[in-house]
Amino acid sequence: MSQTDKKSWLGRFWALPLVVALGVVIALVIIKSQPQMQHQVSAEKGVPVTTLQVAEYEVRPTVTGYGEVEPDILLDVRAEVAGKVVYVHPQLKQGVLLPAGTLVVQIDDSDYVLALKKAQATLAQNRANLAEQEITRQDAELDLKLAKDKLNLASKELVRFEQLLKKRSVAQSQVDSQRNAVLQARQEVQSLQNSLDALPYNTEVLQAQLEIAEAEVAAQELNLERTRISLPFDARIASQSVETDQYVGLNTSLFSAQTIDKVLVNAQFALPQMRLLSKGFDLPAEQADIFLEEGTDTETLMSRLGLEARVSLVGNDARVSWEAKVERISNNLDPASRTVGVIVSVDRPYEQVEPGLKPPLIDGMYMQVELQGRAQPFLVVPRNALHEGELYLAGEGEKLLRQPVEGFAQQQMLLLDPQQITLTSDRVITSDLFPAVKGMLLEPQADSAAQQALADWLEAH
């Protein structure tokens, strides 16, 4: 390496450290020349939220169940006598409405007319025998009276003969003859008395035969009536299985009919729903056995429960509904769903029909049933304030509180039992909050819209 190249290489080797050192010196000078920095604490800002003041209100709780329409009475009409069907009403078809008293089926009554005449003849014969027995009794009583008179005279005559015998005015043979006459008279009286004493037993036999004959007449008259089958109530025909000229035996099914003046809905409710309503029952726990007492007035019992019901078609406009009455509560749980059945009734559903809007309630319709109980105290909060089982609350110092709760959904509101739940704050957050970190600072504002919605809901309930 030449001397010149060696100097050039050495110059490049020292140039880089020199430049770095010079940069460091310049940076230190600039930093030292700047004014000293001071730390300033910035004010922490809360998250804006809307809140609703939670209070206790008197609310009539309402629960919803579902069930199918079924008739109050479904009558399976069967033949009570055997014979050939000679008449079937032309309108005896499934779904047809027929008024009470309509003759729908008639069975040939020829055999039953003859049987009735025979029974009536036997009855007349027994009545005549009983009347003849009465005449016999009267004759026996008269014969007995005459025989007693005859015995009395013979006895007096015997006494007179015995006195004359003492005076030797009559022969002994005459006295003996008179004594024999007295004995014969006494025997006749005894025989007539025995016959008269036996007459009541004969009369009882004849009376029993008369009653048998009367019962036979009544039975044949009933059989004759049973050949004519009429509807016992205004009915809708559910099924028909008989035709004219068909022979039907005893207990053959002819048709079935259901009442139209009342229908039933057996709606199923979850146990927590029934517990909610049961708090308003006017029925102390020690009187729970009233449900099992014989002769308990069901209507009075249901009124003590304070339940009101309304039914509507599932999926239909809720405004199209029917007022209902709670008839009874099922005595066991449904084995599949573990729900309680509540049977409600709707009176005169066919009279409430509005074409195109309100149909008649017919067997098998799937209905929604709303049960409303007596007013009870509840804490009421909007349902949208519940977040996965928790309420967000604005606590002291405007810090976020999270409290798990269990309540009962009531349309757009949530009912909380004040006897079981005590809120850690009376301000519930109604707006969305994410993330919701316990203890985070809040900036709450009153939710006037939620307050008005709550007021409107309370007025409707």
Image: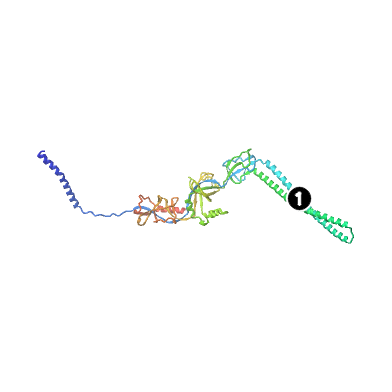
Foreground residue among 177 and 397: 177
Q: Residue furthest right?
A: 169
State the scheme by which the image is colored.
rainbow
**At numbered mark 1, what does the secondary structure look like: helix, strand or loop?**
helix
The quadrant holding residue 91 is top right
- Answer yes or no: is residue 285 visible: yes
Q: Give residue 24's position: percent from left, percent from top.
A: 18, 48
Residue 142, visible in the rendered structure: no
Number of labelled discs?
Answer: 1
Q: x, y percentage for residue 256?
A: 58, 43
* Residue most extreme to the left: 3
Along the horizontal axis of the image, is 409 left or right of 330? left
The x, y position of residue 109, in whole percent, is 67, 41
Q: Residue furthest front?
A: 172
Residue position marked by numbered label 1 in the rendering: 133
Residue closer to the observer: 28 or 459? 28
Residue 4 vertical position relative to residue 425 in the rendered view, above or below: above
Query: What's the residue at 66%, 44% (across, down)?
Result: 223
Q: Residue 289 at x, y = what percent?
A: 53, 55
Q: Nearer the viewer, residue 149 or 384?
A: 149
Q: Quadrant of the N terminus?
A: top left
At a point 16% along the width and 45% down the height, the residue shown is 17
Give the amino acid type for the residue marked by disc 1 in the picture: Gln
Other residues around mark 1 within 10 Å, as few (<14) / some (14–19) / many (≥20): some
